[in-house]
Image (spheres, grey):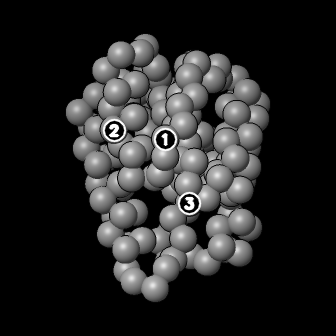
Amino acid sequence: MKIAIVVSDFNKEITSRMEKAAVKAAKSLGAEVAKKIHVPGSFEIPFAVKNILEKEKIDAIAALGAVIRGETHHDVIIVGTIAKKLVDISLKYKKPIGFGIIGPRVTWKQAESRAEEYAKRAVKAALEMARITKK
């Protein structure tokens, strides 16, 4: 089973931990991390995911990012948009995408405490769905 990992570099102190946890989780579940892509921010994740699915032979993708609460509701809009686009891409290409994006409405401290768990869950969900669809 081949998985790709797409990681946002924004809030890198958190997302670098997520990336390490995702790679470890994939290996422990018997998957090969066939591709890792870094993007500037979480908003760019759907574009990178679509690009991978158009060009690579991948069974699943884990999308990782951390969108921290600010003074406005910008984080809510960003995470909602990303979630919708990832679902659209997943359905179009018939490939599972694990949603490992922390947010919206989280503090830095909350994001730090959730980093590894969100990454592991995204990988696990994507791989489980890939196995289900291969049956």
Residue 69 position within the rendered picture, expressed as x and y whole percent measured from the top left: 51, 77
Crowdedness of circle 1 by 10 Å Cα count: few (<14), some, many (20+)?
some
Q: Is residue 15 left or right of residue 88?
A: right
Contact between labelled residues 2 and 1, with CB atoms less than 8 Å apart: yes
Residue 118 position within the rendered picture, expressed as x and y whole percent measured from the top left: 62, 55
Spatial CA span between label 1 and label 2: 9 Å
- Whether residue 135 is visible to the viewer of this picture, yes or no, is no
Instruction: Give the residue drawn at x 57%, y 48%.
Output: 9
Sooner in the amino-acid sequence: mark 1 or mark 2: 1
Instruction: Give the residue drawn at x 76%, y 31%.
Output: 28
> Which residue lies under the disc numbered 3?
66
Give the structural element (helix, strand or loop) at label 3. Answer: strand
Q: Is residue 93 left or right of residue 24?
A: left
Contact between labelled residues 3 and 2, with CB atoms less than 8 Å apart: no
Instruction: Give the residue drawn at x 36%, y 42%.
Output: 46
In this rendering, the label closer to the viewer, 1 or 2: 1
> Which residue lies under the disc numbered 2?
47
Give the structural element (helix, strand or loop) at label 1. Answer: strand
Q: Amino acid at mark 3?
A: Ala
Task: Please tell me in which quadrant of the rendered image residue 110 appears.
Answer: bottom right
- Whether residue 130 is visible to the viewer of this picture, yes or no, is yes
Q: Amino acid at mark 1?
A: Val
Which of the image's four quarters has the N terminus? top right
Spatial CA span between label 2 and label 3: 17 Å
Sooner in the amino-acid sequence: mark 1 or mark 3: 1
